[in-house]
Amino acid sequence: MKARRTPVPGLSPLVLILLCWGLTGLGAALTLAHLHALDLVQTFMRREGITDTVFNGTGLAWIAFGLTAYIVGDVAARITRQSPRTAPAQIELGRAAKYTFIANLVLLGVTALWIATSAAKAGGLFQLAASAYLDSLTTRDLLLENKLFTGMRLFYAALPATACLAAALLSTGQLHGQGRRLMWATLAINTLALLILPLVMSQRLLLLQLLLSAYFAACLVRGRIFGLHWAGLAVLPFLALWIGREAITNPLVDRPALDIATQKLAFYVVNDMFNAFAPLTRPIYNTNGGILLEGVMFLTFTEGYFLRLLEPRLAALDPMIGGGEFPFFTAAYVDFGVKGGAIVILMVGFVLRRIFVRGTRHFGWAVVYAQIGAALMFSSHSVYFTHQNFYFSAALIALIVTLSQRRQAAAPKSMPKPVFRSRRKPKPAAPPLPDSLVRHLAVFTSQKAQHKTTERARERT
């Protein structure tokens, strides 16, 4: 069976994963090859206990095996025929813009309330900003301790989702007037918020998530890749945030901020590859979903129970991880071993391909896949598309799109089928009458009508 070609093949999940892991591997190789000239990278590696001895053929073989399993799942999704579905519901763009703006105000309001509560305990907003410059880690801990309710960070982490929706609505080219102004305001406010807030609250990847997902959504809605030069310019805000964050978190390092940020970026690339290779260098006990299912456990309020059960196994992984988290392929191996991990990777490849195909046909799925595509671009750093932040963002997108669907008139109800059906065979239709008999019947009918008309005239007379 021939695979069906879909629009925007350059944004398929397989392409994004290959691009991410290829660039990460190349960056790590170049950094390790010139490690003697990068003194700050050496310092950061010693601090995290990272050595280059873990980069061996075993880890490379697993990554290649995991990538092969993913390709199998992706190809299986291409060649299997999907069941026919009804036409997608139409979206009222003006209504979608209004709901997106309202949802974004709620997200910003909760985030502002969180910051205001923390600032009140720190002695004021300026005092909070000063403490962030002097000790950013302590300030971050203060923010985490002052959450008003469980899951408050989900509202802050969902800002890229509403910005992605705004970019998708603007890319339709059919949004005018107030709706268009609201979406430009949403996109600008969220970008500015995620350019400033991560300086104190960390999570710099949220800005990268916003920029990438907004661009992917615009390309999917238009059905083609466009504006690559503008996409390149969009990286500048993230680099500015990265340099500013490193200047704040390393005030005692007597180096230019650009030098610190560049070497810290090189270190993170090596760190991500260390997290990918280290668990393959020694025997481990599988965590049985403690990593990939953490988001599901958080949203079902079972995180504490399962983490207590898995605490010994998770603690044993500490020497095999630097900063951050396990990347996608390694997380599957740590959770379920070789066979189970390969099956999970294959299933993920199958599902993501199906979501991508739907994203090329449906507006709502396009926005959801844009979030997944952005997460795939840093899948060598973490498994963001299984995180609770992603699930919350996807649910918010689905809610807005569902509420924005165009209301159609109810279709007429069909007659119910009879419960008991007769087994009698229908009688055959009667043969047609001969032409001569039909002619006589027509003459007789016309004469009979004339006779009736004559009788009625006589009665009136």
Image (cartoon, helix red, strand yellow):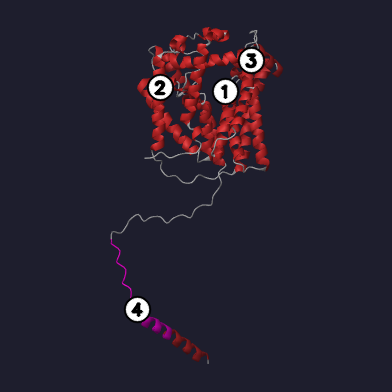
Between marks 3 and 2, how big is the CA–CA gap? 35 Å
* Residue 205 disc label: 1
The amino acid sitting under disc 1 is Leu
Q: Quarter of the image holding residue 427?
A: bottom left
Report whether 197 appears left or right of 319.
right
Residue positioned 45% across, 12% down in the render: 320
Query: CA gap, disc 4 to disc 2?
Result: 83 Å
Q: Could you say whether the residue bearing mark 4 is in a helix, strand or loop? A: helix
Other residues around mark 3 within 10 Å, as few (<14) / some (14–19) / many (≥20): some
Q: Alpha carbon of mark 3 to alpha carbon of mark 1: how far?
A: 19 Å
What amino acid type should be assigned to the residue bearing mark 2? Ala
- CA gap, disc 1 to disc 2? 26 Å
Is residue 433 inside the magenta stretch?
yes
Ranked by sequence position, the earlier of labels 4 and 1 is 1
Do tag 1 and tag 2 residues touch (Cβ < 8 Å)?
Answer: no
Q: Earlier in the sequence, mark 3 or mark 4?
A: 3
Numbered range of the magenta stretch: 424-447
Which residue is under mark 2? 64
- Give the labeled residue for mark 3: 258
CA neighbours of label 1 inside 10 A, class few (<14), some (14 to 19), many (20+): some
Q: Secondary structure at mark 2?
A: helix
The amino acid beneath tag 3 is: Leu
* Visible residue check, residue 414: yes
